[in-house]
Image (cartoon, rainbow, N blue to C red):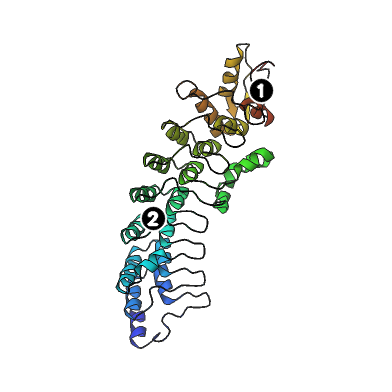
Amino acid sequence: MECTKILIGAGAGLNSIDVGDASGITPLHQTCYHGYSQCTIELLNAKAQVFVLDDTATSPLHIAAHIGHLECLTQLLDAAERSSALRTLLDHRDRAGATALHKAAYRGHYECASVLLERGAQVDATDDEGATALHKAAFSGKKDCVALLVAHKADSNARDLKVFYLARLSLYLYRYLAFLLLCEKLTRSYCRSTQGETPLHKAAYNSHEEGLEEMIIAGGRSDEPDANGSTPLHNATYTGSVSCLMKILAHRTNPNCADKRGWTPLHVASMKVHSHTHSLKSRPHSSLLTHALLHTRSVCQGLTDVVEYLLSKMTDAGVQVDPVDRKGKTPLWYAIRKKHEVRRALPYGPGA
């Protein structure tokens, strides 16, 4: 910091303090990236422009919010307020359409997000994909930021516009690789992220149960369908999160809601379970189906647990065991189609 102060005092950067390098990165960008608050003060006192952009339209405020350097962020906001540029700085979007609040929320920097909101950042501003800061926080599982945004009246039912964070799925590839290699086209198409998802869809898909509950309590609709008709309940089922299912069904969500294919959550869970069932003794057909699905030993135990949990809610939540999709197929049909062996279990006859 002393070297910076001496150089500025000697006239360094007098006419080029806001000039960036080959990527447009200025000294102010650098100090905010590294969290050098004293250097930030020196640059601002030397009349460095607080609203200066690099080649990706990123401002120093974006960087401070993204990294979580609260002191630098506060100094930038103070300087912007003095120069009547606060509104411009808060509302500015980078090349991807993200504001500083998007950056702070996604990375879970609660204090930075709180200061931005206190200074007037738009809580429901959207990026180029239609995502709000709440989408970002919900997707990355930053429950404190979710609670903060909800407290500032963020819209829990806001929809994004198009495929959201497909690159993020690579982080989950390790967990699902063996299964994805075995899946047929029908299941692979369901795996894709869809349009029109709410923050609840994101939280359910990534098993962020605390953020999910926070948004439901704040008024988020747990039965809201996306563009493909999938609800947060479908998403929680797909990823095998019984805890998220419990949170959603506790708020009287319809457990038999069907997407555009006619798939209920039980369809989704049954087509993903890869299991060998026990041999069953002869008993009434309706109980045979329940017994076949409840008594599985699965190499994908998470989804077996989902099937078991859904069927355990047949009485109090009204889960239907034999729902039929638009092609006339039941959950049992998909379980068998996906090569889940049911040995000497079910006789041919009416029903599933």
Residues 304 and 163: in front is 163
- In the rendered view, tell whether residue 253 sits above or below residue 73: above
Residue at the spot 42% in from the left edge and 34% down from the top edge: 247
Q: For residue 66, say whether it is visible.
A: yes
Contact flag, marks 1 and 2 (Cβ < 8 Å): no
Check disc 1 and report its element: helix, strand or loop.
loop
Give the x, y percent position of residue 117. 34, 58
Mark closest to the chain's N terminus, 1 or 2: 2
Q: Is residue 172 above or below residue 285?
A: below
- Counting labels gives 2
Alpha carbon separation for disc pair 1 and 2: 52 Å
Locate residue 271, reporting x and y percent.
62, 32
Three-letter amino acid code at the position of disc 1: Val
Q: Give the residue displayed 37% in from the left and 39% down from the top.
A: 217
- Position of residue 350 measured from the top left corner of the image (x, y, whole percent): 66, 16
Nearer to me, 173 or 135: 135
Amino acid type, callout 2: Val
Q: What element carries label 2?
A: loop
Q: Mark 2 points at which residue?
A: 123
The label on residue 342 is 1
Q: Which quadrant of the rendered structure holds the C terminus?
A: top right
Crowding around mark 1 (Cα neighbors within 10 Å: few <14, some 14 to 19, many 20+) is: some
Q: Residue 330 carries which label?
A: none
Question: Residue 61, position in %: x, y?
Answer: 40, 67
Work out whether 88 lies above or below 319: below
Mark nearer the viewer, 1 or 2: 2
Report crowding for label 2: few under 14, some 14 to 19, many 20 or more residues within 10 A (C-alpha): many
User: Would you identify the image quadrant in which residue 347 lies?
Assistant: top right
